Image: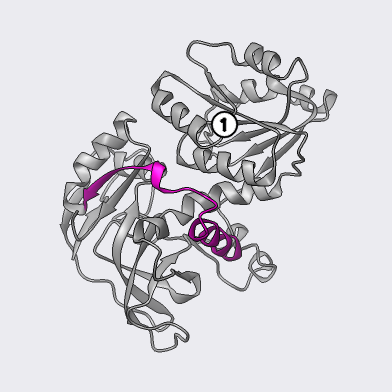
Amino acid sequence: MLAVVKEHMGPGFAIKDVPMPVCGEDDVIVKVKSVGFCGSDGPILSGTREVPFPLIPGHEFAGDIVEVGTKVEGWKEGDRVSACIVIGCGNCKFCIEGNEPLCDHLTETGIHVDGAFAEYVRVPAKVLVKLRDTTSYDFGAAVDPVASAYRTVKKMPITSKDTVMVLGPGPIGLYAIQLLKLRGARKIIVLGADCDKDRLEMAKKLGADYTINNSVEDPVGRVREITDGEMLDFVHDCAGAVPLVDIAMNTLKKTGHYYITGLFHQLAPTDLGKVVRSEIDIHGTICYTREEFKECLQLIEDGRVEVTPMITHHYALADMEKAFEMFCSRQAIKIMIHPEGI
């Protein structure tokens, strides 16, 4: 089968024929129809994130089951499915409590084991969710980023009096806007930069009340103006960028809440004295549970979360180099890859 393979640290990846995955007794083989290009795939393909080499990346996918393991029940060939990236061991304290993202022996598709930038992918049957017959494969491939934002928003004790600022108008941030609207947030502000102009416009269309361009505006002053000096009840960090931490801390009101979805790859200096003096709560979330993944699929299938505006580009798997260039240029919001071509 054709696959994108990252073979070493540093620049470069291969698009080549590789052996088909072998179906284990508890697994299924899925013929990939759509797979989203995630922000976490960029550092893998660019060679700045260390992973087990060689690796086929890709974890936001949907397709058809073509083979079922001998111990698998409840699934059959032809079922249209998506799958969680999170593969818990099932035996540790966190898995038993239904909190598998914190599994002591966590495995993630496309990061620790081969993923879906390929014509076929093997996944454990336990992580599958079934798509409705009317749900497109692109929609099925969108569940992962929705669920990543959803786990964070779900934990926020938001009321109809609260003002929230989303840091980073990437796909997760844009989904967070919609989820925050569903939670009933009073005002939603989105912070981006010059390179995010199209995404900030999209944020307005999806429900943001205000946008701030950090390249040309003072975010602290602008938040003070928008909130009449009251400042923010919540910051939802979907970027994981070190320079934005001070912005978060300086725009939150006393007793404010800083929720972090974006994954930091560098240490961020933070004034913990301010955390104490202002009684600011800081919360981190990682990935999502299987139940949360199912809930997000339902939100998409019921039309309560919009996916179509987010998908701006489509590429065949053989054109991954072009897709990677588009990702690096930040001209796309969400890129969908199609192993069968477009």
* Residue placed most toward the observer, 213 or 276: 213
- Residue 310 is a magenta residue: yes
Image vertical order of residue 35 relative to residue 170, above or below: below
Q: Is mark 1 on a helix, strand or loop?
A: loop
Q: Which residue is drawn at 54% across and 50% down?
A: 148
Q: Which residue is drawn at 54% across and 39% down?
A: 262
* Residue placed most toward the observer, 112 or 180: 180
Q: Can residue 269 be seen in this view?
A: no
Drawn side of residue 125 relative to residue 147, left or right: left
Region of the chain picked out in magenta, as a range: 290-316
User: Could you say where residue 202 lies in the image, as x and y percent from the top left?
Assistant: 45, 32
Name the residue carrying label 1. 208
Q: Is residue 156 visible?
A: yes
Q: How many labels does the image show?
A: 1
User: Could you say where residue 123 lies in the image, as x and y percent from the top left?
Assistant: 40, 70
Image vertical order of residue 74 relative to residue 15, above or below: below
Drawn side of residue 141 relative to residue 156, left or right: left
* Residue placed most toward the observer, 169 or 225: 225
Q: Work out which quarter of the rendered image holds the N terminus and state it.
A: bottom left
Q: Examine the image and state in which quarter residue 247 appears.
A: top right
Packing grade of label 1 (10 A; few <14, some 14-19, many >=20) is many
Q: Which residue is drawn at 44% across and 81% down?
A: 26
Q: Which residue is drawn at 67% across and 50% down?
A: 154
Drawn side of residue 252 relative to residue 151, left or right: right
| Callout 1 amino acid | Ala
Image vertical order of residue 149 relative to residue 102, above or below: above
- Residue 209 is a magenta residue: no
